[in-house]
Amino acid sequence: MTHNEDHREKEHSLIVENAQVRMPDEKTIGELSDLFKIFSDPTRMKILWTIGDGEVCVCCISELLGMSVSAVSHQLKTLRQAQLVKARRDGKNIYYSLDDHHVKSLLDIALEHMGE
């Protein structure tokens, strides 16, 4: 084995070892994959952008997206189960907002990436 081949083999071993250390476990990888599946739906993305700056009631989301309240509620249920949105009831109205600042950050980073 030449010096260059030995060096390249050690370099490859380090790359593989570093990647193995950083790689999340299988459960976490599956959860990440599921999260990105949630983001892959255009209607859900529109809902997330709609509530990105604060609370919005279901009827306003419905009107903005041109969808029935029932269809919007169905998508909001999926987003709630994924812990991307939270709900607050005020009388008969339910107001939705992003679950935390990380969701807004994910959306902003994705949009920034699209612009590059």
Image (cartoon, grey):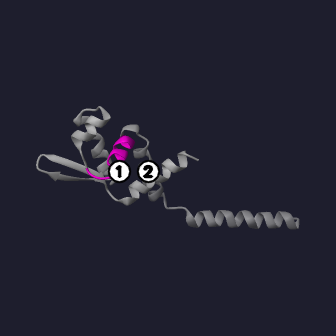
The percent position of residue 32, horizontal first and vertical second, equals 45, 54
The correct choice, above or below, for 2 with respect to 68 in the image is below
Q: Quadrant of residue 3?
A: bottom right
On residue 52, which mark appears? Answer: 1
Label 1 Cα neighbours within 10 Å, binned few <14 / some 14-19 / many ≥20: many
Which residue of the protein is positioned furthest toward the left in this rendering? 91
The percent position of residue 67, horizontal first and vertical second, equals 28, 32
The percent position of residue 84, horizontal first and vertical second, equals 34, 53
Q: Is residue 53 magenta?
A: yes
Residue at point 55%, 46% (across, down): 115
Given residues 102 and 41, the one toward you in this image is 102
Q: Quadrant of residue 68?
A: top left
User: Helix, strand or loop at disc 2?
Assistant: helix
- Looking at the rendered structure, the kind of residue marked 2 is Leu
The correct choice, above or below, for 69 with respect to 81 in the image is above
Residue at point 88%, 65% (across, down): 2
Mark 2, residue position: 107
Given residues 53 and 68, the one toward you in this image is 53
Quadrant for the N terminus in the image: bottom right
Give the residues in magenta: 44-55
For the residues labelled 2 and 1, say whether their Cβ atoms are less than 8 Å apart: yes
Label 2 or label 1, whichever comes before in sequence order:
1
